[in-house]
Image (cartoon, rainbow, N blue to C red):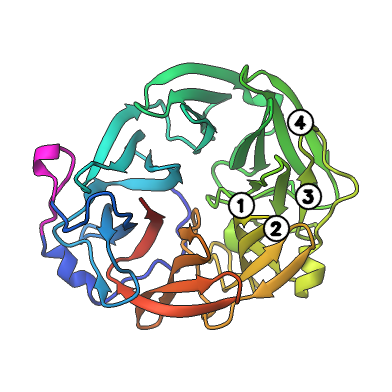
């Protein structure tokens, strides 16, 4: 299958250097590099995507003590993973979810001496759409493949990545149409919520954009219960961004809808906004609607990361849906939104930019956020003060793009 390509993946001049350098793999402990670290001291970890001369990508997950000065490079260090990978952090482990031809899942953590180390290595019939925390010892992973007629849930041991249980249901439970695409998954109480949108698996056309749909399953039994719908906005989430559903401390679920052409939609027939499923309920809250388009003057949130106390970091597409270039994931402007008060506050000092067309790579570290931003001269780290809504420019990153930004 040919996947759509986001047009803004950068090719920096410095990448010619990477093509001529042999990287050291950390797949085996005896081959592991020995970065200079203080035992037990947290480090910044970045998963850097580097394109080789054959146009394929390799990901290097690398520790850094400082991300605000100098140049950040993967040369000669880090855990090397050729192919396509999506990265997510759950507690003190980074999970790399393989896609395309490499459908394995590997956990990355820090050993006692400070080195990065891999735990587990499990493969599935197709790539995982996502993985979320169920409890301190349990993860739930999802396979929602456009070529399959089954929705598959896997329960995994968080410490070993061993599969403890698999539960599958027919796709026809959630739609009679072909090609449901994953956009978000969250567990709240005794329910699992799965958001999706429908698109043609061959052309990626999205012909059904008149309502939001979320499938509800029991947890831990993972039995299908029903699909809930809301016509106040369109489908939840977008292509590969995986931020359709967000959960707060109360267990309330927030569903983000935008129908952005820049994130894969071929049409948009409803305004963008945010819906809520109140904790303990299995229906959309009729009294809650965050009309993002009205507050932003016709703009839509493309990416969302929950921070706490009702606040979230948002990447807002500054072009209206009718003006967006399809698959461009931009132009984006960063903001802090308040899900409770329904406000949007833009970040000063951070330039308008394009995204990566995939899960947002941003680190939330107490009062600050760290993310990479592509500019004309290269990719740079920015440190965002959440309270003051300001950003400071940091180190330059030698990579095509940053696939993950963490701290361990």
Q: Which mark is residue 275?
A: 3
Q: Is disc 2 placed on a helix, strand or loop?
A: loop
Q: Is disc 3 placed on a helix, strand or loop?
A: strand
Is tag 2's residue or tag 4's residue first in the polypeptide sequence?
4
Q: Are marks 2 and 1 in contact (CB under 8 Å)?
A: yes
* Crowd around label 2: few <14 · some 14–19 · many ≥20 (10 Å): many
Q: Which mark is residue 258?
A: 2
* Crowd around label 1: few <14 · some 14–19 · many ≥20 (10 Å): many
Give the CA distance from mark 4 to mark 1. Answer: 18 Å
- Which residue is rendered at x = 51% and y = 78% of the image? 391
- Which residue is rendered at x = 85% and y = 43% of the image? 285
- Which residue is rendered at x = 14% and y = 37% of the image? 28
- Is 224 part of what is drawn in magenta? no
- The residue segment tinted magenta is 22-33
- Which residue is rendered at x = 45% and y = 66% of the image? 370
Q: Is disc 4 placed on a helix, strand or loop?
A: strand
Give the CA distance from mark 4 to mark 3. Answer: 15 Å
| Residue reaching furthest to the right | 287
Q: Which mark is residue 227?
A: 4
298 above or below 280? below
Residue 15 percent across, percent down from the top left: 23, 70
Q: Which residue is mark 1?
A: 238
Give the CA distance from mark 3 to mark 1. Answer: 15 Å
Is tag 4's residue or tag 1's residue first in the polypeptide sequence?
4
Residue 17 percent across, percent down from the top left: 16, 70
Q: Is disc 1 placed on a helix, strand or loop?
A: loop
Q: Is residue 319 visible?
A: no
Residue 201 percent across, percent down from the top left: 56, 41
Label 3 vs label 1, nearer the camera: 3
């Amino acid at each position: 299958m040919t996947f759509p390509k986001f047009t803004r993946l950068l090719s920096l001049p410095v990448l010619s250097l990477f093509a001529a350098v042999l990287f050291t793999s950390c797949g085996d402990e005896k081959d592991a590099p020995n970065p200079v670290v203080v035992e037990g001291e947290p480090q910044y970890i970045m998963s850097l995507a580097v394109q080789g001369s054959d146009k394929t990508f390799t990901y290097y997950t690398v520790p850094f003590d400082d991300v605000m000065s100098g140049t950040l490079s993967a040369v000669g260090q880090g855990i090397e993973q050729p192919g396509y990978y999506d990265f997510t952090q759950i507690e003190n482990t980074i999970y790399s979810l393989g896609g395309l031809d490499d459908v394995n899942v590997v956990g990355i953590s820090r050993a006692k001496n400070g080195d990065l180390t891999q735990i587990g290595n499990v493969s599935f019939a197709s790539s995982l759409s996502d993985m979320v925390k169920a409890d301190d010892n349990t993860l739930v992973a999802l396979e929602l493949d456009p070529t399959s007629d089954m929705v598959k849930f896997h329960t995994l041991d968080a410490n070993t990545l061993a599969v403890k249980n698999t539960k599958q249901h027919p796709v026809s439970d959630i739609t009679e149409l072909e090609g449901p695409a994953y956009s978000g998954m969250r567990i709240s109480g005794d329910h699992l919520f799965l958001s999706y949108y429908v698109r043609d698996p061959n052309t990626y056309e999205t012909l059904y954009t008149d309502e939001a749909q979320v499938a509800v399953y029991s947890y831990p039994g993972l039995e299908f219960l029903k699909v809930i719908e809301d016509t106040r906005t369109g489908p939840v989430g977008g292509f590969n961004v995986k931020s359709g559903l967000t959960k707060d401390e109360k267990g309330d679920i927030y569903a983000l809808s935008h129908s952005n052409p820049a994130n894969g939609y071929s049409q948009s027939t409803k305004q963008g906004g945010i819906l809520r499923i109140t904790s303990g309920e299995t229906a959309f809250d009729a009294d809650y609607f965050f009309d993002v388009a009205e507050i932003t003057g016709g703009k839509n949130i493309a990416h969302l990361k929950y921070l706490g106390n009702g606040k979230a970091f948002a990447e807002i597409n500054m072009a209206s849906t009718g003006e967006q270039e399809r698959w461009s994931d931009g132009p984006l402007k960063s903001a802090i939104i308040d899900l409770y008060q329904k406000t949007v506050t833009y970040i000063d000092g951070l330039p308008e930019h394009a995204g990566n067309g995939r899960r947002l790579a941003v680190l939330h570290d107490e009062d600050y956020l760290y993310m990479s931003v592509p500019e004309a001269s290269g990719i740079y780290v920015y440190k965002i003060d959440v309270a003051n809504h300001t950003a400071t420019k940091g180190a330059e990153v030698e990579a095509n793009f940053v696939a993950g930004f963490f701290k361990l």
